[in-house]
Amino acid sequence: MNAVSHTRTYMSPDVQTTHRIGHIIGSCLGEGDVVLLNGDLGSGKTCLTQGIARGLGSEDNVRSPTFVIVAEYSGLIPIYHIDLYRLEKIGSIDNLYLEEYLYGEGVCIIEWPDRTQDSFPLGSFSVRLEKVNQTTRAIQVTVPKTKNNLLIRNLNIELPFRS
């Protein structure tokens, strides 16, 4: 993905900063965008998603959809929060009938995208969260070159980055 994308890693010392990073990401997303969230349990994927939803104008109570697979939230455009964690290796996302979300009119935020061997739409955003210590997270954001680089510019203005 690096050959055709822009990647930066931002340090988040606390939950509020993780929410802020998510808010900036959400404010730069549009219809049809897909965000792939990778990271271990407790790395802050749902916390970041809460910020993304706020950036998309949602005031809904965002929580992990682990037991329902897909949670839908209202905002400026529909928000589909998909969590593949509880699924054992699935052969294809076709088996879950997620295409209507992935190629629909809203934004898809997918936790644990590595649970499927399918590739997600070209032009998907990628975010990797890594737990540095109890409160600090390293958040690596990859924006496809086909997308507006506004996201990286906005993050760079507001946050220190490494790499």
Image (tube, grey):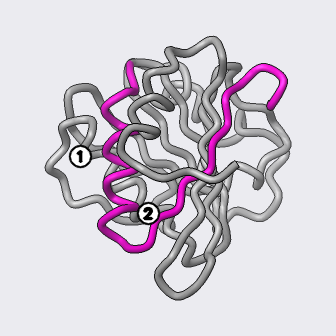
Residue 142 in the figure: left or right of residue 17: right
Which amino acid type corresponds to the residue marked 1 in the rendered image? Answer: Arg
Q: Identify the residue at horizontal 55%, vertical 78% (top origin).
A: 42
Q: Residue at x 50, y 15 (%)?
A: 148
Image height of 12 relative to 126, above or below: below
16 or 96, nearer to the observer: 16
Quarter of image, res 52? top left
| Magenta stretch, residue numbers | 1-30
Query: Which residue carries the number 1 mark?
Result: 54
Residue 5 higher or lower than 41, as above or below: above
Of the 4 image quadrants, the one containing the N terminus is: top right
Residue 39 lies in quadrant:
bottom right
The disc placed on residue 46 is 2
Q: Image check: 71 left or right of 142? A: left
59 within the magenta span? no
User: In the rendering, at what x and y percent does residue 85 appear?
Assistant: 64, 65
The x, y position of residue 68, in whole percent, is 46, 60
Closest to the observer: 102 or 13?
Answer: 13
Residue 45: x and y in percent read 51, 62
Q: Earlier in the sequence, mark 2 or mark 1?
A: 2
Give coordinates of residue 4: x percent, y percent.
Answer: 77, 20
Q: Name above or below for residue 121 compared with residue 57.
A: above
Quick check: 28 above or below 7?
above
